[in-house]
Amino acid sequence: MVRVESRNLLARMGAILAVAAVAVSLGPVKADATAAGTGADRYCAVLIGKSTEEKPSPVLARACDDSSAANAREKMLQVTSKDGSNSTMKPLAADLLMTWYSDTDYHGASTNVFGDDGPCDRAGYRLDVNNTTFGLWSHILSSARGSGPCNTARFANRAGTSSQEFGLPVPYLGSLLNDNVGTIWVYNR
């Protein structure tokens, strides 16, 4: 009897240790994924060009900073001035289109998206958030604000099977789109 009880106890302890090991190994994955999604920086700035024929807007520049959104924007502008072939931007002509947040209610890491071709109009800008330039934003985007005339956005999930239009700002993308954004069309309605 002692041997059977000892084996059962050892089996239970082994199972508990296995579950604990899995839980410990999964914990940091989420934290690392969130940090990696923003390039390990809290603030990012992305400059995009105007979309043509309903294709995604080209990404012209991207920069990040851990201290402020203003520093990220300055770094982005430095990138565009060094590589003039990628941008049609005139100095300080980038218009803020929208800001993405990793958490609901406009909290967490953020990315400011700037337009190289002026503010939003009816055609707007189309963003392929699955593009590797945006890091893991397609997996962490939870809320968004528009800027100026950028008052409407249509968010589609990564699979492209569902979309929803929101008036901006939107404090929570809802259960189907939270942490599951593939494309965004931001425009003026």
Image: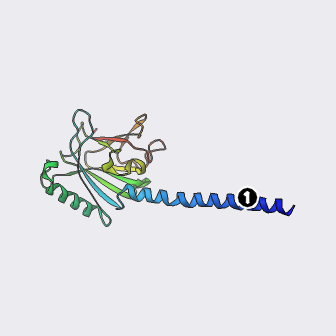
Residue furthest to the front in view is 3
For label 1, the SS is: helix
Q: Is residue 123 above or below residue 62?
A: above
Q: Which residue is mark 1?
A: 11
Identity, as a three-letter code, of the amino acid under mark 1: Ala
Of residues 169 and 88, the one drawn nearer to the viewer in this rendering: 88
Residue beneath the point at 32% across and 60% down: 43
For residue 88, side relative to residue 71 (left or right) = left
Q: Quadrant of the N terminus?
A: bottom right
In percent of width and height, residue 6 lies at 79, 63
Of residues 47 and 17, the one drawn nearer to the viewer in this rendering: 17
Q: Residues within 10 Å of mark 1 (few under 14, many from 20)?
A: few
In percent of width and height, residue 168 lies at 34, 46
Residue beneath the point at 35% across and 61% down: 42
Residue beneath the point at 24% across and 36% down: 123
Of residues 20 and 182, the one drawn nearer to the viewer in this rendering: 20
For residue 72, side relative to residue 93 (left or right) = right
Quarter of the rendering containing residue 4: bottom right
In percent of width and height, residue 169 lies at 36, 48
In percent of width and height, residue 176 lies at 47, 41
For residue 176, side relative to residue 132 (left or right) = right
